[in-house]
Amino acid sequence: MTSTETRPRRLSPEEVRARLGEPEAMIKAKVHDRIDRHGHRFIAHAPFVAMATSDATGLPDCSPRGDYPGFVKVLDERTLAIPDRPGNKLADSFRNLAENDGIGLMFVVPGVREVFRVNGRAYPTDEPDVLARMRTEGKPAVLAIIVEVEETFFHCGRALIRSRLWDPASQALADELPSVGEVAAEQMGPGVDPAVLQTMLETGYRQLY
């Protein structure tokens, strides 16, 4: 951990803007306050979304959500519904939304360089009609998060291009990492068998719904 004495200096918003300059008018014009037909189509093809929330103190959390393409439903141009499937039951996002209803979403479509971003306000629901609309493998969602849309825009592909995310050669890096079971066993301390943990994880992966 970097000590307070050697921590890099904090820039003010004015200093950041001076370094970056002003965005072009065309960039500002791409921000909208609703889901148009292009955003709707992108969401319908997206099997993955990163969901950012924060608690009352502003401490952030970013949670991955994924399912068959189109698992997030566009209820209307200003409302989305995100299904909650069985998971680790930590419920971090739900706890945050109870304290701070702000939410940020980033939709990703495999092979597409650009992402679609949505910001707004959100709350959980168990409304049967909403859960039924998100039925997968014959089962409705456990809960849903309703997002009241305030801001939407397509984000350029520079980050995904630089990261080479869709380059198959980049996947070779996965071979250099330990398994999640090995990581968890080390973090949990002596007496924990990494093979057992990995088996538990793999069993859970096979029971997605």
Image (tube, rainbow, N blue to C red):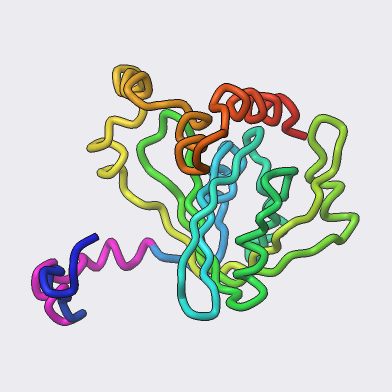
Q: Is residue 130 left or right of residue 15?
A: right
In-image side of 61 versus 80 (left or right)? left
Which percent across, then down, holds residue 92?
61, 61
Quadrant holding the C terminus: top right
Task: Give coordinates of residue 49: x percent, y percent.
Answer: 54, 46
Against 141, residue 45 (above or below) is above
Q: Is residue 119 visible?
A: yes
Residue drawn at x 70%, y 56% is 81
Quadrant in which residue 101 is drawn: bottom right
* Quadrant (top left/top right/bottom left/bottom right) for the N terminus: bottom left
Instruction: Determine the residue positioned at 84% across, 60% down.
Output: 126
Magenta-drawn stretch contains 204: no
Q: Is residue 156 above or below residue 125?
A: above
99 vs 33, left or right, is right
Residue shown at the point (17%, 71%) measured from the top left? 22
Q: Nearer the viewer, residue 96 or 196?
A: 196
Q: Tell me if residue 208 comes above or below residue 29 in the rendering.
A: above
User: Total marks drawn?
Assistant: 0
Q: Per the image, is 23 magenta?
A: yes
Viewer-side residue, 60 vs 111: 60
Residue occupying image coordinates x 67% and y 74% = 98
Answer yes or no: is residue 17 visible: no
Image quadrant of residue 196? Answer: top right
Residue stretch in magenta = 14-30
Q: Is residue 33 left or right of residue 123?
A: left
Q: Residue furthest front?
A: 191
Q: Residue 116 at what x, y percent from top left?
A: 46, 50
Magenta region, mostly helix, strand or loop?
Answer: helix
Indicate the position of residue 80 as horizontal and vertical percent values: 66, 58
